[in-house]
Image (spheres, grey):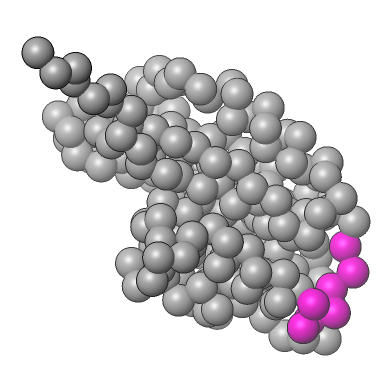
Amino acid sequence: MMYQLPSYNPSEKIPIPTKFIDSLSLLDIVWSDMFETDHVNPDVARQHQTDFFKGAPPKWLNFHQVNLPLVERHGFNDLIDLIEKGKRKRSLITDVSLRYQPGSGGSTLAMQVLWHFRKDLRCARVIDSDLDTKKLSKQAVALFLLSNEEHAEQNQRTVLLLQDTKEKINDQSVKQILWEDLIEEVHERHIDTKIPAVIILNCIPTDFTLPSKPL
């Protein structure tokens, strides 16, 4: 089966060969036609939805139209607007940060945003818990070009990359390390682009609880 991703031409979609998909082992990609060409068992879909409402982590099937649509969470439209602005920036890499109280649904909100953009941008979620940012950067740039070869024909489309695995590596910001590695990878591959290669959607669990006042 060939999954599809947006082309540089907004009116076109590109089928992606299995060999290329297998090379992107650190990315959970949200395909433009996800679940559209597969038969989705309604019982399985309902079970996923039931599990989610009971507190299980969201899966992409939870956002598919076969289920009842999930309520757009607070902040959804703000994130959409920020990413739309990021698409127009003349920067190689840009980012949008989402700070949320742990347990408040921040990861679900971020996944909703990726699902929203799946037919416009090349959307992917980081899945490697060890977070090898060098390898991740190579795969993200390969997704931007739809090529992992230096001199291959390229088809550029901005990658929306959800990073919600961890915040720091050795006391350094993951976003900053990833940003620098992405810039290095773009320069090493001599990429000429007028659009951002990657927009990092950076999830940051944050404790907003106010300290209790002494009695």
Furthest-front residue in this view: 215
Q: From the viewer's perspective, tell me whether residue 1 is left or right of residue 168.
A: right
The image shows residue 159, relative to residue 128, as above or below, that is above
Q: From the viewer's perspective, tell me whether residue 142 is left or right of residue 71.
A: right
Q: At 73% across and 34% down in the image, what residue appears?
A: 84
Name the residue nearer the viewer: 50 or 184: 184
Name the residue nearer the viewer: 69 or 162: 162
Q: Quarter holding the C terminus?
A: top left
Question: Is 206 covered by the magenta stretch?
Answer: no
Q: Which residues are magenta?
A: 187-193
Q: At 51% across and 48% down in the image, what residue appears?
A: 202
Q: How far from the left and from the top, in percent, is residue 17?
A: 60, 72
Corner quadrant of residue 158 = bottom right
Residue 40 seen from this side: no
Q: At 76% across and 35% down in the image, what residue appears?
A: 85
Q: How far from the left and from the top, in percent, is residue 89?
A: 83, 45
The image shows residue 56, relative to residue 80, as above or below, that is below
Corner quadrant of residue 182 = bottom right
How many callouts does the rendering have? 0
